[in-house]
């Protein structure tokens, strides 16, 4: 990470690395990171709005074609996130295959919001991070067996935690959960198929 990068960006990279992400490429206001086959671009924008009008310029500037997830860390992340989502939709309408999803993270609560955002990113991209195929309980939606498709051990200040993504093959429900060292499961994100 360049020494002149904003503190918020350095903190986001640190938190993602604790979750198993590897840094692939960095700049003064971005970091392209990877977990297995999933690529996440973390940006700390210089402005909270786009100054580009052409979709191709936005795709190039924000590397929308290189990442599966774009994490916008800012004091006002929602406006830029909406503009990036709009650019992705315009690109799709013109025939470009851009599959990136944009996630806003408020810099004032970076630890808490990034933690939830990573859970949602993992659940949305389970096919790119899959490292397991175990059965684990019944789906709360349809009753079919759930599959653990991602299983990761995380060690941080609070001790050892097991992070999992579960998917129901029948109805498409996705669940992200943490299991603390004592075995208590806490679900962070349930994402219906859609």
Image (cartoon, rainbow, N blue to C red):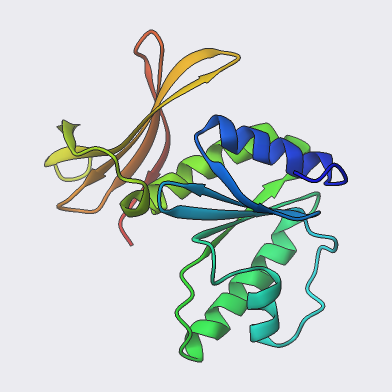
Q: Quadrant of residue 6?
A: top right
Quadrant placement of the N terminus: top right
Relative vertical location of residue 72 with respect to residue 8 in this rendering, above or below: below
Would residue 46 be visible to someone looking at this image?
yes
Taking the image as shown, residue 1 lies to the left or right of residue 87, namely right
Taking the image as shown, residue 91 lies to the left or right of residue 30, namely left
Quadrant placement of the C terminus: bottom left
Give how far across and how far down residue 100 sits, in percent.
Answer: 51, 66
Which residue occupies the extreme left position in the image?
Answer: 144
Give how far across and how far down residue 168 sits, in percent.
Answer: 20, 46
Q: Nearer the viewer, residue 51 or 184?
A: 51
Q: Residue at x 22, y 44 (%)?
A: 141
Q: Nearer the viewer, residue 86 or 97?
A: 97
Taking the image as shown, residue 190 lies to the left or right of residue 26, namely left
Q: Residue at x 72, y 65 (%)?
A: 80
Give how far across and how far down residue 129 sits, in percent.
Answer: 36, 47
């Amino acid at each position: 990470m360049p020494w002149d990068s904003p503190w918020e960006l350095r903190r986001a990279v640190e938190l993602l690395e604790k979750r198993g992400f590897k840094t692939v490429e960095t700049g003064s206001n971005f970091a392209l990171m990877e977990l297995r086959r999933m690529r996440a671009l973390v940006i700390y924008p210089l402005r909270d709005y786009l100054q580009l009008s052409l979709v191709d310029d936005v795709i190039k500037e924000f590397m929308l074609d290189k990442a599966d997830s774009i994490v916008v860390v800012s004091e006002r992340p929602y406006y830029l996130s909406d503009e990036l989502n709009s650019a992705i939709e315009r690109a799709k309408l013109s025939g470009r295959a851009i599959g990136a999803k944009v996630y806003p993270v408020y810099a004032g609560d970076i630890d808490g919001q990034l933690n939830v955002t990573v859970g949602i990113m993992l659940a949305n991209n389970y096919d790119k991070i899959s490292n397991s195929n175990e059965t684990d309980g019944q789906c709360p939606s349809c009753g079919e067996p759930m599959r653990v498709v991602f299983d990761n051990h995380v060690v941080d200040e609070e001790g050892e935690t097991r992070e999992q993504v579960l998917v129901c093959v029948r109805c498409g429900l996705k669940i992200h959960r943490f299991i603390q060292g004592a075995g208590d499961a806490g679900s962070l994100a349930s994402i219906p198929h859609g």
